[in-house]
Amino acid sequence: MRHSPAGGGAARAGDHAAALAHAEAGLALWDGPPGDVTAGDDPLSALHAERASVYRSLARIRALALSRLGRRAEAVDALAGLAGERPRDEEVLLELLRCEAATVGPSAALARYEAYCRALRDELGADPGPALQAVHRQLLQGAAPAVRRGP
């Protein structure tokens, strides 16, 4: 349990290598992802739910740290899974867009961004946050062909 808060603290401090080390150390204590956790009133169900939450937190810290350390090919699948579980987590989506642009190409990242925008507008009538919009602009600039001037 101590690896999750330590990894989160390291990530917030910008020490992504330490965050990754804490997350991987915490995940190494697990046999695998927790199964489906059903909420119940008994103490055992509460313990299972808390453990599942810690596992998801460690997996999130690990995926974000991999991306921020430039290990984008390793991070893309984990981030895609997290984005599926947490469709409104813009921090995860932002890193996923960067990873997809680097590994698959900007067009895949732009398509994911547009799908997110459509769903966000349809469900909440809102636009993405400023950080996500900035990454979108960067993707558009990177996807634009170079303009030659002169002969």
Image (cartoon, grey):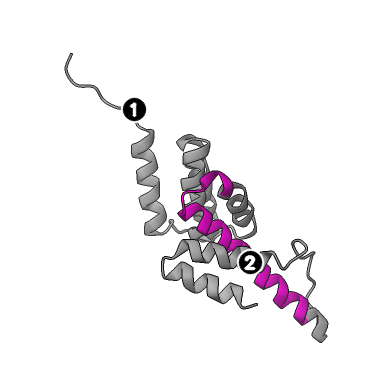
Q: Tell me the quarter of the picture where residue 145 sits.
A: top left
- Using the image as rendered, state which of residue 42 and residue 59 is in the foreground: 59
* x and y percentages locating residue 80 in the rendered image: 60, 50
* x and y percentages locating residue 148 in the rendered image: 24, 22
Q: Residue at x 37, y 39 (%)?
A: 140
Q: CA distance from mark 2 to mark 1?
A: 43 Å
Q: Residues within 10 Å of mark 1 (few under 14, many from 20)?
A: few
Circle 2 SS class: helix
Circle 2 sits on which residue?
Answer: 25
Q: Is residue 32 left or right of residue 14?
A: right
- Using the image as rendered, state which of residue 115 and residue 105 is in the foreground: 105
Q: Nearer the viewer, mark 2 or mark 1?
A: 2
Residue 72 falls inside the magenta stretch: yes
The kind of residue tagged 1 is: Pro
Circle 1 sits on which residue?
Answer: 145
Q: Which residues are magenta?
A: 46-74
* x and y percentages locating residue 44 in the rendered image: 82, 82
Q: Residue at x 45, y 59 (%)?
A: 126
- Whether residues under marks 2 and 1 lie with C-beta atoms below 8 angstroms apart, the answer is no
